[in-house]
Image (tube, rainbow, N blue to C red):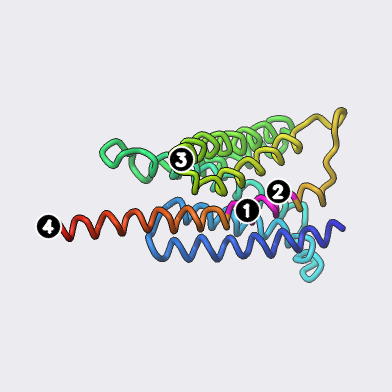
Amino acid sequence: MTGLSGFILFLISFYATFNFFRLYTIDKKILHFCMGTTAAFLAIYGASSFLALFFPVLDPDFILEWSTVFSVSFLLSAAAALVRDFKPVFSRFPKSFTFIPLVLILIYPMIIDTLVVKYWVLGLYQGSALLIALLIYSFRTYENSDYAYMLVGVIFFAITFLLYWIPESLFTLPVYVWMLLTSSGILILTVGYNQAYNLEKEVIDREKRKETWFA
């Protein structure tokens, strides 16, 4: 069952990777680059058992751990880029600041043997990214209900996150269930984002037409 759920996670994450990198080639937004990279490492996570099967020299635990580190690092960078894009142009912080969360990749070898610390750091990264996304897309949904689909995807991820981090003494989430929930969240988020992106593009195009008309 875990192998099947991993394959599903790989397929959906690969679709999300292609989708966000396609958007990045169009508008060069850091958000799209970070989201695409996050999805790419989630695809590697899902395919880890198959990679180890075809390439015995690879350690699946090593692949799982480092794909997690890279994915959560780029996820928080994506959240930082989301905050930057949400701000008015005159108050935005420099683009380079959105990559500060990637420092985790450099310091992770120092905490890799401290089980509690590294899990807390990874959980903090995930929780921070989800909280930022929930706040921003809740506000956007309040302004325009067309963003509701996007908000549903974020809420789905938040529920999965909470279930995953509940102490094992109270509740245990099987690995394959976590993978399937994550896959569902990625799919909802990607489809919802495409709708939100098309909506934003329509608004921008409409504003450009107004500026051209009154020029």
**Is 182 included in the stretch rendered in magenta?**
yes
Mark 4–mark 1 Cα distance, whole angstroms, equals 40 Å
Label 2 SS: helix
Q: Mark 3 vs mark 2: which is more N-terminal?
A: 2
Question: Which quadrant is home to the N terminus?
Answer: bottom right
User: Crowdedness of circle 2 by 10 Å Cα count: few (<14), some, many (20+)?
Assistant: few
Q: Give the range drawn in magenta.
A: 181-189
Label 4 SS: loop
Question: Which quadrant is home to the C terminus?
Answer: bottom left
- The residue that appears at 42% across and 52% down in the rendered structure is 30
The amino acid pointed to by label 1 is Ile
- The residue that appears at 54% across and 48% down in the rendered structure is 74
User: What residue does disc 1 label?
Assistant: 188
The amino acid pointed to by label 4 is Ala
Q: Residue 215 carries which label?
A: 4
Q: Nearer the viewer, residue 214 or 48?
A: 214
- The residue that appears at 65% across and 43% down in the rendered structure is 157
Q: Mark 2 vs mark 1: which is more N-terminal?
A: 2
Q: Where is residue 196 in the image (x, y as percent from the top left)?
A: 47, 53
Q: Mark 2 vs mark 4: which is more N-terminal?
A: 2
User: What residue does disc 2 label?
Assistant: 65
Mark 2–mark 1 Cα distance, whole angstroms, equals 25 Å
The amino acid pointed to by label 3 is Arg
Q: Mark 4 vs mark 3: which is more N-terminal?
A: 3
Q: Is residue 36 above or below residue 119?
A: below
The amino acid pointed to by label 2 is Glu
Label 1 SS: helix
Image marks 4 and 3: residues in contact by CB distance under 8 Å: no
User: What residue does disc 3 label?
Assistant: 140
**Is 205 included in the stretch rendered in magenta?**
no
